[in-house]
Amino acid sequence: MVNATDRFDIVIVGGGLTGTAFALALRNSPYRVALVEPRPPGPPGADWDARVYAYSPGNVDWLRGLGGWAEPVRAQAIHAMRIFGDAGGRLSFDALETGLPELAWIAENGRLQYALWQAAGQVGNIELVAAQPEAVAWGEAGRHRLVLADGRELVADLLVGADGASSWLRDQAGIGFTVKDQHQAGVVANFETEKPHRGIAWQWFAGDSVLAYLPLPGRRISIVWSTHEDAVPERIARAADDFAADVAAAGQHVLGELRRITPQAAFPLKIRRAREWVRPGLALIGDAAHTVHPLAGQGVNLGFRDCRLLAEMLAAGGNPGDIGRLQAYAVRRLEDVASMQFTTGGLKSLFTNPDPMLRGLRNAGLGLTNGQDWLKQALMRHAVQ
């Protein structure tokens, strides 16, 4: 039980996937940790969550080690990927080519968050705090005071912002961010399929949009249909059967007829990067620090790699808010994040450019890559980390 004023080494603001996983990664550290989340996850129902993510095998192994990849998580392995350009270009990836059992895993956000939260609640050095942050009093030498809406105050050497793309803690610190508006939105929904997906993920670049089929357990898929923001209202308004027919047709009926099992929803696509990731006694991780275009499914994986590195760098003990160590974390993570933002943003721009010459080049590029086994293996080995 947290007292009216309590002292911690580390206070994490945000109990989503990234924040809770980071707390768990500190379970064997010498630090006392508070995880603050105003809306803790409750036990999931039987319905399917339209919010699903792709998880790299390396991150899944890490989550298993934390005890967070467990019931009630429902996960499906991706054994192969099929990518189609808008003028005949094709690119295929198969786990067998790398000697790996899978390329990625697909799982629902809500169930994994609940599993991580339950695991964190069983760790002795972690306090789960179900309260709304209200204010921050920035102290000397990194000793900051987090004021909660219920009147409690948490004092910490290190505050960690894991509260998403619209981070409250980042705003409280006055840290701005650069944003590249894609003028697109991702439309998501889940479907039952006529044909088995066999653990294959599919992606189609259609000039004005990108459609991804992500396999779920059983004969089910989740889709992300990235499209210009002007087209979103019409797609959201489509009746269930009509939208299912649209998605099946856009996916060339590779899985036969589809039946929608969750209503379609949409979220804006913006590439963001905070101008500062660290200050004395402050660190940003996950979407609070950076977001990427979802076409490569790497956003949550970048956040987990933030957690893995920062927890590793803090494992030796000492003052967790020391700026030297935090700056080293930021420098080491910047290359990975910048590379992914450049790659996903560049692919989006390349495949939505109407120039006929670029159309031919981009499809030729897919075919060229598909014929270079060494390049495909290098790409896959980076993606599975």
Image (cartoon, rainbow, N blue to C red):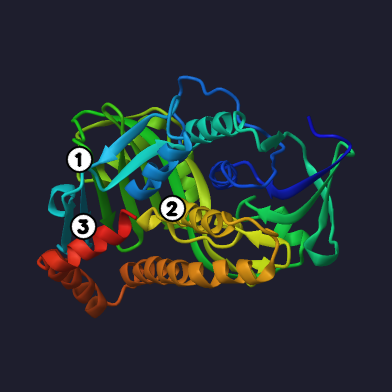
Q: Quadrant of the C terminus?
A: bottom left
Q: As drawn, is 74 to the left or to the right of 197?
A: right
Element at label 1:
loop
**Which callout, 3 or 1, points to the residue nearer the camera?**
3
The amino acid type of the residue labelled 2 equals: Asn
**Which callout, 1 or 2, points to the residue nearer the camera?**
2
Q: Do we see residue 340 in this rendering?
A: yes
Q: Residues within 10 Å of mark 1 (few under 14, many from 20)?
A: some
Q: Residues within 10 Å of mark 2 (few under 14, many from 20)?
A: many
* Nearer the observer, 166 or 318: 318
Is there a contact, CB below 8 Å, between mark 3 and mark 2? no
Mark 2 sits on what residue? 301
Task: Give how far apart the Cα atoms at labels 3 and 1 are.
Answer: 14 Å
Q: How many marks?
A: 3
Mark 3 sits on what residue? 84
Residue occupying the far left of the picture: 371
Residue at 77% in and 40% down: 132
Mark 1 sits on what residue? 253
The amino acid type of the residue labelled 3 equals: Phe
Is there a contact, CB below 8 Å, between mark 1 and mark 2? no
